[in-house]
Amino acid sequence: MDFSWTEEQLQFKNEVISFAETKLNDSHLVNDHKLEFMRKNWQLCADFGMLSLSVPKQYGTHTKDIDILSAILAMEGLGYGCRDNGLPFAMNAQMWTVQLPIAQFGTETQKETFLPKLTSGEWIACHALTEPEAGSDVFNMQTTATKVEGGYILNGKKHLITLGPVCDIALVFAVTNPTLGKWGLSVFIVEKGTKGFETSLNKAKMGLRTVPIGDLTFTDCFVKEENRLGSEGAGWSITNHSLELDRCSVHASQIGAMERQLEASIAYVKQRKQFGKSVGQFQSVSNRIADMKLRLETSRLLLYKVAWLKSQGKSAMLESAMLKLQISESFVASSLDTIRNHGGYGYLTENEVERDLRDAVGGVIYAGTSDIQRNIIAKTIGL
Amino acid sequence: MQEKIIKYIEEELANEELDGGLEATEDLLGSGILDSLGMMKLIAFLEDEFGCKVLPEEMVIENFMTVAHVNDYLVSKQ
C-alpha cells in the first residue's frame, strides 16, 4: 500500500493553492452577502486549467491527460486556497456531471462543439436531473421527450439545478419510453435560446450563496436528434457513470476546506488567552481540535481510496457512499467546531468563520442525502 | 454462465423473494427485481466473476434487460 504522491502531483496542488489564495479571495464576502456568482473567478479558474481536469487533453487546456488522483489532489488544493466554497462546488458540478458524460458518451461532433467552450470558460453548463417530485427518487421523473421527425419535443420542469440560472447549455434527463422504467430515460443537450426552454432567476439559499441555483422549464421545446447524448435509453448509465467521480471530486474540495478550518482553529486558540493562558491549553478545546483532525484524516483516507479505485477502473459503490456520508457530515461537524473554537468572533459574519457552516449543510442534502448514503451502505453490505 | 448469474441475483440482489425462481427472460430493472444499486452490484459481479470490463456505454437495455441479454452480451465479449 503506497500513499505517496509524486513531486509533480504535489507541485500542481501547491500551484493551485497559490493561484486560489492570490486570485480568488478578493470579493467572496460581498458575493456571499449579495448572492452573486463571480463569473470573473470562474474564468480565472478556466484559464488556470481547473475546468479541464475532467476531460481528455484535446478538449481542454492541458498538454497531457490528467489522471483522477491528480485531479482530486488539485481540487483539494482549490478547496484549501479558495475561501468561497461555492466556486469549487459549482465547478465540480459542471466538470463531472456535464463535461465527463459528454466526453464519455458524446459523439465526436458533440465533444468538439461543447467541451472546448466549457473548459475554456466561454460557456457554463448545468446537469438537469432533479424535479419537484423526483429528488432522492430521481428516476420517478415527469419530464418527457417525445420523438418527432428530426428530434424530440421536451416538456417538463427541472428543480434545484446548480448553475441553472446562468447556464448556456443544460444536460437534461427525460423519459423517452415510460414503459421501460429506468431504461426509458434519455439525455439531451439543450442550448440556451432554444424555443420553449426557460430558466428561472437565482434562488436565495442558506449557504453556497455564490452559486446560482434555480429551475428549468421546457414547454414544447424541440431538440435536434444530434443533441441526444448517447443512445436512446442511456440515461440510467450516464447517471451512474458520473456519480462516483462526482462524489469524489466535490468532496475533495471540502477536505481542503476542513484543513483550512483546522489550521485557523489551531492558530486562533493558541493566541487567544483567557484565564491567563491560551484557550488551546484547555482540554475541552484541544480535544475538540483533535476530533477535527481525526475527521479530516479519516475523510481524506476514504477520498483517496475512492480516487484510487476509480484510477484502477474499479467500482466504488460502497466506498463512494461512505465517502459522501463521512465528508459531508464531517464538514458540518468541523464547521460548527470551528465556530466554537473562535467563540463570539466566529459567530460574526465579517470574520468568515460562520460561512463554512452555512456552506457545509448543503453537503448532507445534495448528490444523495446522508439518509440515502446510509441506505446504500446498508444494502451494499447485505442488509 | 446463465445459471451463475441467476443464482447470484436470487441469493444476493433480488429486492423480494422470487416465486418460482428467476426466469432468464424477466426484465430485471424495469420490473423492479433489481434497483439501480442492485444493477451496479450485478455489473461488479460480472466483472469479477467473468473477468470482463463493462464499459459505461454498454450499460444499456440491449445488454442488461434480462439475464438472457446479459448472457448474450458476455458471450459477445469473449
Image (tube, coloured by chain):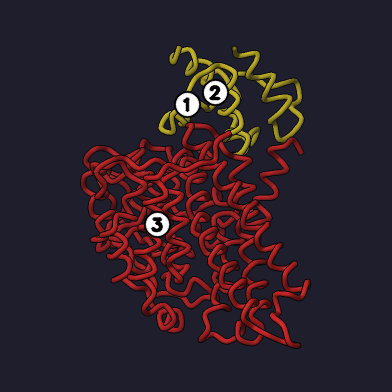
Chain colours: A red, B yellow
Left or right: A65, with A323 as reference point: left
Q: CA distance from mark 1 to mark 2?
A: 7 Å
Tag 2's secondary structure? helix
Q: Residue drawn at (60%, 67%), measured in percent from left and top? A: A262
Q: Residue drawn at (35%, 57%), measured in percent from left and top? A: A15
A47 shown above or below A246: below
Q: Residue drawn at (54%, 55%), measured in percent from left and top? A: A367
Q: Residues within 10 Å of mark 1 (few under 14, many from 20)?
A: some
Q: Chain of mark 2?
A: B
Q: CA distance from mark 3 to mark 2?
A: 38 Å
Instruction: Give residue B47's mark.
Output: 2
The residue beneath circle 1 is B54
Q: Nearer the viewer, residue A76 or B35?
A: A76
The residue beneath circle 3 is A14
Q: Chain of mark 1?
A: B
Instruction: Give residue A95's mark.
Output: none
Q: Nearer the viewer, mark 3 or mark 2?
A: 3
Q: Residues within 10 Å of mark 2 (few under 14, many from 20)?
A: some
